[in-house]
Image (cartoon, rainbow, N blue to C red):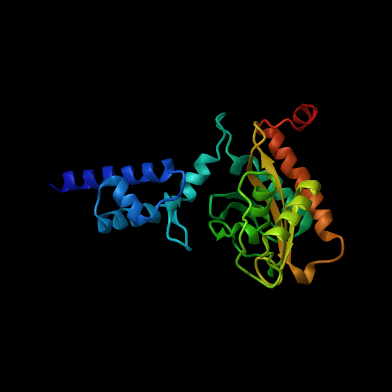
Amino acid sequence: MTVQTGTQSMERGAQLLVHVVEQDAAPTIGELAQLAGLPKSTTSRLVGALERQGLVQRDPDRGAIEPGPVLLRYARKETSGIDLVEIAGGALERLARASGETANLGVATSTAVEMLDQRDSRHILGSTNWVGQRVPHHGSVIGKVFLAFGALPVPDVPLEALAPGTITDPDDLRHDLERTRVRGYATAVDELEPGLWAVAAPVHDAGGTVVAALSVSGPTVRLHAGLLDELGRLVRDEASAVSIRIGYDDLKRGAA
């Protein structure tokens, strides 16, 4: 009886996971229960088990259930078997060494940005561990990269102020995203947290889609004139090199 019950729970959990992955919009617990034909209490319990294993995660704003960090890492593997976390490791090492600051590899879901890998700053101040943390798109340079290069829809409603410098007006955000496209990298100062700056650039797959972004971030006490542009170009070059390694041909696409 215990074996049957355990098997049934595994099957139900797997069914819920399939629904989470296949839905166009992240479903709520109630919507998942309806899709699976299960009681809401049972669905909530099973989702909790999946969440503890990193297979799903909840959107903190509306409680919707999305693929978790384990599935995101797997999904970012190219069909050739190349793992982005592995292939971007050298770029992160070089960025952290050259800047002395924190370097990250991040991806974006429909609701937030998530960091997959990190190389720490050489300084005590600024060595926050961002891996696994989820950040709103408009407050993150990685989110801006996905928005700027068409991988996510640009919001057309006022946005939440996360810090004193957060861009909350949709028109202002569109102007900032246009600058990001022109330069090839995004910048932010005091937009996610007071006292934090960051730059990021896109990683493209073989088809030209933005699948990830590299970033460098640090505290404003070490920010000086020209640093954002200097590091922005450096991050852009490293992101371009990663893109080429996973099959992106910028010259061929530009010629077309």
In the image, taking residue 205 as reference, residue 14 lies left or right, namely left
Of residues 11 and 138, the one drawn nearer to the viewer in this rendering: 138
Of residues 152 and 141, the one drawn nearer to the viewer in this rendering: 152
The x and y percentages for residue 238 are: 75, 44
The residue drawn where x is 57% and y is 29% is 80
The residue drawn where x is 58% and y is 34% is 82
The x and y percentages for residue 214 are: 68, 49
Give the vertical position of 5 relative to 63 (above or below): above
In the image, taking residue 26 as reference, residue 44 lies left or right, namely left
Q: Is residue 104 visible?
A: no
The x and y percentages for residue 48 are: 35, 57
The residue drawn where x is 61% and y is 60% is 157
Of residues 31 and 56, the one drawn nearer to the viewer in this rendering: 31
The x and y percentages for residue 67 are: 45, 48
Image quadrant in which you'd find residue 8: top left
In the image, taking residue 40 as reference, residue 56 lies left or right, namely right
Please identify the residue farthest to the right as the structure is shown.
Answer: 225
Give the vertical position of 210 relative to 109 (above or below): above
Give the vertical position of 169 relative to 91 (above or below): below
Q: How many numbered discs sit on the rendered protein?
A: 0
The residue drawn where x is 66% and y is 59% is 120
In the image, taking residue 46 as reference, residue 70 lies left or right, namely right
Q: Is residue 62 visible?
A: yes
Q: Locate the C terminus by quadrant.
A: top right
